Amino acid sequence: MFLGQLYGRTRGNFRDTKQTSKKAFDLAKKLHDKFIEEYGSVVCREIQQKIFGRPFYIRDADEYKKFEMMGAHKDKCPAVVGNSARWVTEILLEQGSGPKLQKK
């Protein structure tokens, strides 16, 4: 979402998809590729398989309890989110001086 905020379309240029979307899509592809390289997928269930050795059906109370007992929100999921934030930062730094966020 942050890459889209910086490089995506705005109301003023919403119809100009070739010009504005390409940059956002190219950067999102880089982030996608980092997820594939690290986790083999961008799908939560498949990332769970990689990290925990199995996926969880977290809508089921027993499954959710097992998920939490294995450290899901203690360190596993925060690590995935942290990696994502780091990768976005790296991607943006590779861009050099990018567009500035507008104050509303």
Image (cartoon, rainbow, N blue to C red):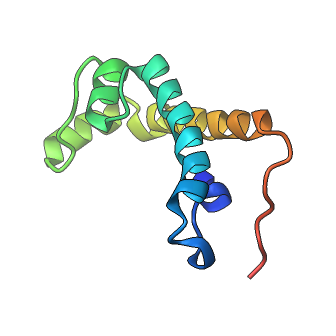
Residue closest to the far right: 97
Tell me: residue 76, above or below residue 64: above
Residue 10 lies in what quarter of the image?
A: bottom right
Q: For residue 1, say whether it is visible.
A: no
In the rendered image, the quadrant that contains the N terminus is bottom right
Tell whether 15 sits left or right of 57.
right
- The residue drawn where x is 45% and y is 37% is 77
Residue 89: % across, % down: 71, 39
Give the camera-side residue of 85 and 6. 6
Determine whether, in the image, residue 55 is placed left or right of residue 28.
left
Q: How many marks?
A: 0
Q: Where 68 falls versus 97 (above or below)?
A: above
Of residues 34 and 83, which is closer to you in this image? 34
The quadrant of the picture occupied by the C terminus is bottom right
Rendered residue at 24%/41% (across/down) = 65
> Considering depth in this image, is 74 or 95 the residue closer to the camera?
95
Q: Residue furthest bottom?
A: 104
What residue do we see at 63% from left, 33% from top?
87
User: Is the residue 73 above or below the residue 2 in the image?
Assistant: above
Q: At x 56% / y 37%, what residue is drawn?
A: 84
- The image shows residue 26 at horizontal and vertical percentages of 56, 39
